[in-house]
Image: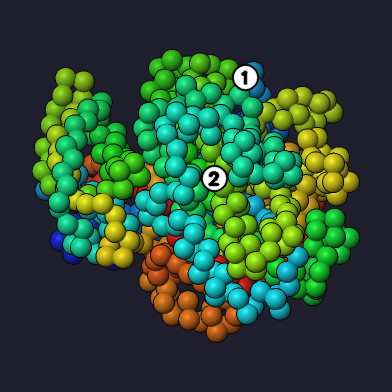
Amino acid sequence: MRGDAMPFQFRGDIAHADVAFDAWAASLDELFAAAAEATLAVMVESPSEVYQVAAVPVHLEEHDLEMLLFEWLNEIIFLKDARRLLLHPAEIRVGEAPQGCTIEALLKGEEIEPERHRLITDVKAVTLHRFSVRHTGERWEATVVLDV
Amino acid sequence: MNIPTAITKISPTLWEIPVSYKEGMLVPARIFATEKLLSEMDAGVFDQVTNVASLPGILKYAYCMPDGHWGYGFPIGGVAAMDPHTGVISPGGIGFDINCGMRLVLTNLTEEEVRPRLHQLVDRLFARIPTGVGCHGFVRLSESEFGQVAEQGSRWCFKRGFATQDDLDMTEEGGCFAGADASHISNKAIQRGYNQLGTLGSGNHYCEIQVARPENVFDAQLARAFGIDIPNQVVVMFHCGSRGFGHQVATDYLKLFLSVMERKYGLKVVDRELSCAPFRSPEGEAYFSAMKCAVNMAFANRQVILHRIREVFSDIFQRDPFNLGMKMVYDVAHNTAKLERHEIDGKQREILIHRKGSTRAFGPGGYGLPECYAKTGQPVIIGGSMETGSYLLAGMAGGADAFFTTAHGSGRTMSRHQAKKTFRGDKLQRDMESRGLYVRTDSFGGLAEEAGAAYKNIDEVAETTERAGLSRRVARLVPIGNIKG
């Protein structure tokens, strides 16, 4: 399975009971967006049916890029449980911070409507199993395993 | 074939990987499996169980149960006992879904009585028990009330009229791990959890109506002792856990341990999912207490769901739930760490046991068991896939070697990704209905992931636990109705 608009691919070889994906992009901003879209695609059949009517600003700081991506995806899962929001990445800026790195972002989406969103599987956590963010040649890549 | 060449056969159902297999191993790793089940295990099992064997303070062996498969840090089916004074506690040894567990409830109805109302019953259960992505529960709580749930577990349910004393007696630890302190849980964990009490969730979580057919009863005497004494008796089994709350607790402490493990305690692990802290440290003790909060939330979650199941049966059959014989057989926890007393090298001592995707299975005379199970051993509930059935078993005296622990399910052999490519949820639903199993789900994609062919043979897993002396088969339970998220 492959995302329609975003560069990510689900894989079945590293997490039998859960969901794993690879994401890739030319920039870190795009990589973080691709990982967020992949996470949404695990939960809903048609992410395009999730309308961007509510906006949630996100600001995170971590000591390295891997933990920043880890926390970014955790934030999306937190908002799904705490506020019942399904969210697309809308604006993302990943940059350096005095103690490591930071993300300033806007997530846009709407409250869960089970009939219209055709829900698939609840994502419950981001794991650190095989988790990585790396720069290879011309692009950034990430591998993520989600606990479902 | 993923089996390491260094493995040796201890018995037809037990295998050992020696400490020489990997640098840093402190104890050998032992895997309970037949040759066939061992050959089906993925490479991750062998890698991860031998990583566990390198954790500081581990005692005797790092174990893996017959349903073992790749997990995070520990394999699913992993068991490790630590010296509480010198050993560590690791969220990776417990899992994200803390106290994910199984509950089995009797009825005095027969399959013949339930069949004519099966669709009505399953439809009503599906309507009344929230399932699926981001669902909110039917118990409305404030954030401060949720703290009481986390500290009191099923006892909170008893006070609020959702439980009977008998329900508490039939739950591991009475439905409340002592020492849970809500001051150790984050605001984020509370915000994720306080509206999820009374939700089933999704993935492999389900509520199932099952039948104990006479030909599937292995031990009639034990079955009678557990309340299964009518031909084609209908029972209800369900599987769920601490929902987003438990996951947030695990995530919070995984991060905390990563930040202090090496810097403060000089601990190094080969896999970040094995991040840990000394059990007797401020961080280790805080996690143990927070984990107990999640354990208690899961007990409370299963308890309020049981209350609702009783309401639904009562509505449909127009009889009081207790007139319907809706008594709990038992509630077992899968993902926990506990201080228990066991015999180690001939001496009774307190040890910290991590059980991840495995079930406590005290044999006859096991401490803390309700009086009615003192002679039988603890009821053990092993859930299979919706297509293949599940098992009721009993703990055995021979389980002492594995700290009285047994399997928890059938274990996957096919990834979710592969299952979804191989099966179609809507077709599977129709096929199952033609075979007498009525299933309601929020998600056909999710249903396809749970196809029976994606799992190991539950019969072989259950039989292996019996041959290994871990748990004795009492009855095989065949599903006729199922709701899943």
* Left or right, residue A29 beside residue B450: left
Q: Say what secondary structure mark 1 lies in.
A: loop
* Residue B68 x %, y %: 59, 52
Residue B200 appearing in the image: yes
Q: Residues within 10 Å of mark 1 (few under 14, many from 20)?
A: few
- Name the residue: 22% across, 31% down: A60
Up/down of B384 relative to A84, above or below: below
Q: Give the number of the mark in front: 2 or 1.
A: 2
- Name the residue: 37% across, 55% down: B133
Identify residue for label 1. B86
- Name the residue: 73% across, 25% down: B350
Which quarter of the rendering shows the N terminus of chain B? bottom right
Residue B52 in which image quadrant: top right
Q: Which label sits on residue B301?
A: 2
Q: Say what secondary structure mark 2 lies in.
A: helix
- The chain to which mark 1 is attached is B
Cα gap from disc 2 to disc 1, whole angstroms: 34 Å
Residue B24 in which image quadrant: top right
- Name the residue: 54% across, 78% down: B432
Extreme bottom residue here?
Answer: B434
